[in-house]
Amino acid sequence: MKKLVVASVLGASLFGANAGISEAASTCPFASLNNNQQQAQAAPAPQQQQQAAPAPAPAPAPQQEQTKAPAEEAPKAETSAELTADEQQMVNLVNQEREKQGLPALKADPELTKVARVKAKDMIDNNYFDHNSPTYGSPFDMLKQFGVEYQTAGENLAGNSSVDGAHTSLMNSQGHRENILKSDYTNVGIGVVDGGQYGKMFVQLFKG
């Protein structure tokens, strides 16, 4: 049986100037890890960046800038924005959870979808499972590189053989659930790529 892994990074404000990043990770059974621990099949989950005192962190998070990267310098996400069946199913599941809580549905965002697919494929191609990509850096760095503008953003990751399995485990984990149900988010991009040791790689990118 393939083992599920999930990880989340909570929303980061553009104005979180010198905020630090603390880490946690979860797998089945879910367990929180601090920034001095390692877990082979789980990814660190940077917590929300605040303007106040920095949270415990391995390193300060770079300040997010509102300036959009020039289009000619932004990496190209050479994928169709039309959702696959798996991606549409997960968008539907996310919005069903939000509806239960009286929250507005998230709009499926073509830009975020393309970036999410690139991140999922990058994890498979480079054999890692982490919010910080060796190719693109943090989720917030990656959004900036692809020219995606936002005020707040977050990322959930999961590895599983099915959409239902990934969604259920994300909802059973506090950090991931908070991202899915965050009222500040308006848009979502979900990338699902077949491959890797878990069968499918799932990336959820949120922005508001």
Image (cartoon, grey):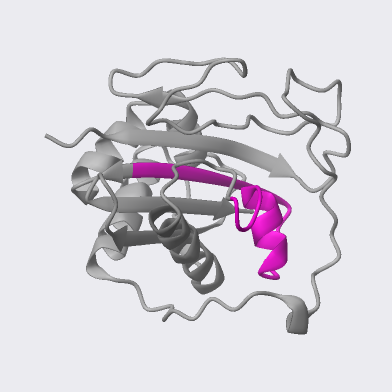
Q: Residue furthest bottom?
A: 72
Q: Which residue is at a point 73% across and 53% down the rendered structure image?
A: 151
Tell me if residue 85 can be seen. Answer: yes
Tell me where residue 54 appears, x and y as whole percent.
82, 23
Tell me where residue 32 appears, x and y as whole percent.
47, 16
* Residue 148 falls within the magenta-colored stretch: yes
Q: Quadrant of residue 11?
A: top right
**Magenta region: which residues?**
134-158
Q: Residue furthest left?
A: 1
Tell me if residue 149 can be seen. Answer: no
Q: Which residue is at a point 65% across and 47% down the rendered structure image?
A: 138
Q: Which residue is at a point 60% across and 57% down the rendered structure image?
A: 135
Q: Nearer the viewer, residue 35 or 179?
A: 35
* Residue 25 falls within the magenta-colored stretch: no
Q: Nearer the viewer, residue 134 or 208?
A: 134
Tell me where residue 77 appears, x and y as whole percent.
53, 76
Q: Which residue is at a point 43% across and 43% down the rendered structure image?
A: 157
Q: Where 40 falls versus 11 (above or below)?
A: above
Q: Where 196 falls versus 62 (above or below)?
A: below
Q: Residue furthest front?
A: 126
Give the quadrant of the N terminus.
top left
Q: Nearer the viewer, residue 64 or 135?
A: 135
Tell me where residue 117 appears, x and y as whole percent.
44, 64
Q: Quadrant of residue 198?
A: top left
Q: Is residue 136 left or right of residue 56?
A: left
Give the quadrant of the C terminus.
bottom right
Q: Nearer the viewer, residue 158 or 184?
A: 158
